[in-house]
Amino acid sequence: MLSLENLDLHMVQIPKGMLTLRDDRLETSWVATIEPYLICSIPVTQAFYAEIARQNPSTSASGGNHPVETVSWLDAARFCNLLSKMARLPERYQFSTDGKDTQAIAESDGFRLPTEAEWEFACRAGAREPRYGPIDAIAWYRDNAEGSTRPVATRRSNDWGLHDMLGNVWEWCEDVYDPAVYGTYRIFRGGGWADGERGCLATNRRRSHPTFAIDDLGFRVARSCP
């Protein structure tokens, strides 16, 4: 069971690399350079969220080892700051006075959300295909999830030991999507329990307002390597 006490055991170091990302809406692509970083092998669970944030907002299914969901991007950023504080690390996110806007502190090595490039790089784990195995072996999705989230790490991991990168819950990323058009909208990745097979691909990109929360959207934590 994921907890503050054993979190270090779940943090996987991801190597340096490069990744080509694509936005089908804009029909553009770009290359991202990825520095080594740490990412949790599983999404934040309901029990872990409750341990740190002292609440459980989940509405899909109740269970400590289910991924937490119905959390907004702002909720996830606040969780990362709380976790950093408990781990005696510098906070990553600086909130505005009204709590509606944030600024990432680049030099912080505290807990944070992965960038979109980091998320996809970790999801692929070196695979060229947009799915790292047969979907029923690696993901909880519409055809097998039976209408709700399922306990984490009960499907096969990718080659880097990361579970539930596809399916179960979508995962918030740190990035703003397109500030010129969408303002503060943030990106989420990975597909969830309510999605069909085509929704669970490493390449799929979605976005929403940072206050948006729904029962198939959660997150996992990352850290820059100290």
Image (spheres, rainbow, N blue to C red):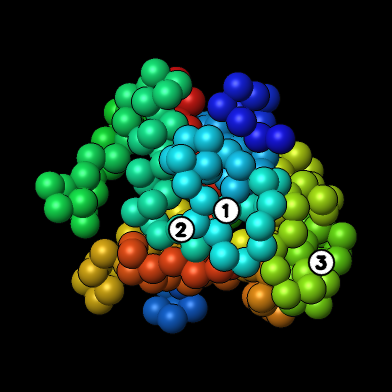
Tell me, yes or no, if residue 111 can be seen here: no
Residue 136: image location, x then y, percent: 86, 66
Query: From the viewer's perspective, is the residue at label 3 or at label 2 nearer?
Result: 2
Residue 63: image location, x then y, percent: 69, 52
Label 1 crowding class (10 Å Cα cut-off): few <14, some 14-19, many 20+?
Answer: many
Q: Are marks 3 and 1 in contact (CB under 8 Å)?
A: no
Q: Is residue 49 above or below residue 63?
A: above
Q: Is residue 88 above or below residue 173?
A: above
**Mark 3 to mark 1 CA distance (whole Å):** 22 Å
Q: Quadrant of the C terminus?
A: top left
Left or right, 123 with respect to 75, comes to right
Q: Is residue 97 above or below residue 179?
A: above
* Disc assigned to residue 135: 3
**Element marked by disc 1:** loop
**Mark 3 to mark 2 CA distance (whole Å):** 25 Å
Query: From the viewer's perspective, is the residue at label 3 or at label 1 nearer?
Result: 1
Q: Are marks 3 and 2 in contact (CB under 8 Å)?
A: no
* Disc assigned to residue 180: none
**Mark 1 to mark 2 CA distance (whole Å):** 7 Å
Residue 222: image location, x then y, percent: 51, 38
Label 3 crowding class (10 Å Cα cut-off): few <14, some 14-19, many 20+?
Answer: some
Foreground of the two, 123 or 4: 4
**Element marked by disc 2:** loop
Three-letter code for the amino acid on which mark 2 is drawn: Val
* Disc assigned to residue 68: 1
